[in-house]
Image: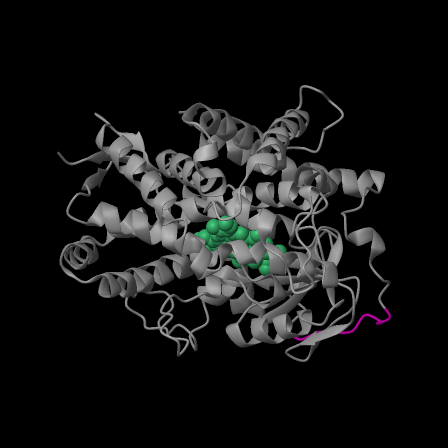
Amino acid sequence: MAELEPRSRRGHRLLQVLLLPLLLHFFQGINFCAGGSAQQSRFRPRTLRSTAAVQRAALPILGDTLQLLNGKTMSSYQVDGRRKFGNVWKTSVLFKKAVIITGAAELAEAMKQESRPNATKAFFPPHHQRLFGTESLLMQSGPPHRKLRRLVQAAMIPKAVSSYLESINEGVSELLAKCKSQNGPFSMVEMLRTAVVTTMLKILFGRQASASEIESLIEDVSTWSDGLLSAPLTFLPWSNAARAMRARARVAKIIRGWLQSCGDGDGTLLSRLVYTEDEDGARLTEEEIVDNVFTLVFAATDTTASSLSSSFLALSRHPDLQQQLREVCSEEDVETVDRNLDAFLSEVLRTSPPAPFAMRLVEEDLEVSKVPVPAGWLMVYGFAGTMLCDAERYPQPEEFLWNRTFSDGQGQSLDEAAFGGGPRMCPGRFLAAQVAKTVLREVLGPSGFRWELEPRQDLSQRYTPGLFPVDGLKVVLKK
Ligand code: HEM
């Protein structure tokens, strides 16, 4: 099985991708995909609430870009900012004026306004547009995004997820077997990343993909995602970005081939993408399917692996809780196990959010918490700043309280805050929760395993881009 690249190297790549576009953007006038078409602000600059200290930045146009985008400070920047400036504050990010929004009520207010058809636009660097493809959900905005999203998310609603259980169980069994076959210390992070991408490919393609095809797909997907995390040098054939474009072309060719033979109702996510129709009888085009397969693999892998790696870390740090969950997973009925794992996973996602923020380019003037957000500005949703600090929604937010209770009144007990909200709320949340809970149930259940953390390793977590312990969470299994 192709092993994925060590985290530390990927961390350097992330730094490159963050810094290089900034410099290119600044010196050569390269614009981010949505930026060029942004309507000019009709607002005059106004003084916003609590802005004085933020505007202290020596380089006003750079503002807080480096703190917000640095894998080490992505969360702490939001937490510190909220303590200093309140729930909503003004700065600059990626050479644009920006408003950072934290707080459950404030995020809900912003997302409600985002629901207006043309209020905001997606905001990504241009080489991401090429690597994901223009038909990716991530790149689309406004009414075309809504239309596309209805078709794509139909493949990830709970009913669809239950039809992927066989692939999920197979992927999780392989993970357990591989962990148990290790004779010495190993990186749990690498194990989880490989297992999640393998499982996702099985869910997408089912039995169409042989073991060797899955192996080469994993390698190409890994090369492709390295391109996303590298400088946008697609014009240099040996650069990561150019290698990523070639890997993308190879995978796209395979997907196009499978589209011809993919049958209705064969239980794969691919077949749902192919055959689902909207209310007008329209289906996804071949281009839309290919671009969104890449989007789903990318959006699913690091986030789900990160939530699992943070779960292993939390279980290692709280042995009593681990024992309690082992008893639940060994003795209780399916519903009780599910409810307990929902509660645990909610607290893991709250304290270690895999996706700590999201950005929008504002197209129509908005107002959040009485703070104007003019067209042409960036609106940054501070998910981490909210989940780590909002004491109204999460009493004693600094504590790991795994049995906080959440309920949406329909029996849903997973807190969904880590999955965002509004028109771009994560459509993969049911699938992510199903995969994560299956791994936890099996590892903590009677045929699972126990582990110990290797001594002398750095357990602090960094975004690369998912949140992972710096040394890859090295563990050794207890025999
Ligand atoms: C624990 C795991 C996950 C977390 C924490 C997570 C989190 C998020 C968040 C916060 C967003 C919203 C970003 C925004 O507002 O721009 C998002 C969007 C998205 N997620 Fe997830 N995600 C996870 C797993 C998945 C999985 C498994 C899939 C697919 C199989 C997926 C597919 C997507 C897609 C396609 C979008 C873009 C939606 C759009 O722009 O309309 N995610 N995710």
When the figure is inspected, residue 365 is found, relative to residue 382, above or below; the finding is below
Is 342 in front, or is 167? 167
Occupied quadrant, residue 347 = bottom left
Q: What range of the chain is rendered magenta?
A: 42-49
Q: x%, y% of residue 453?
A: 24, 39
Q: Which residue is painted at 38% across and 37% down in the image? A: 195
When the figure is inspected, residue 286 is found, relative to residue 432, above or below; the finding is above
| Viewer can see residue 84 | yes
Residue with the most extreme top position: 238
- How was this image coloured? one colour
Q: Relative to residue 211, is residue 50 drawn left or right?
A: right
| Viewer can see residue 73 | no
Is 197 in front, or is 395? 197
Query: What is the quadrant of the C terminus in the image?
Result: top left
Q: Which residue is painted at 75% across and 56% down in the image? A: 96
Q: Which residue is painted at 45% across and 26% down in the image? A: 215
Query: What is the quadrant of the N terminus in the image?
Result: top left
Q: x%, y% of residue 321?
A: 20, 58
Q: Which residue is painted at 84% across and 42% down in the image? A: 29
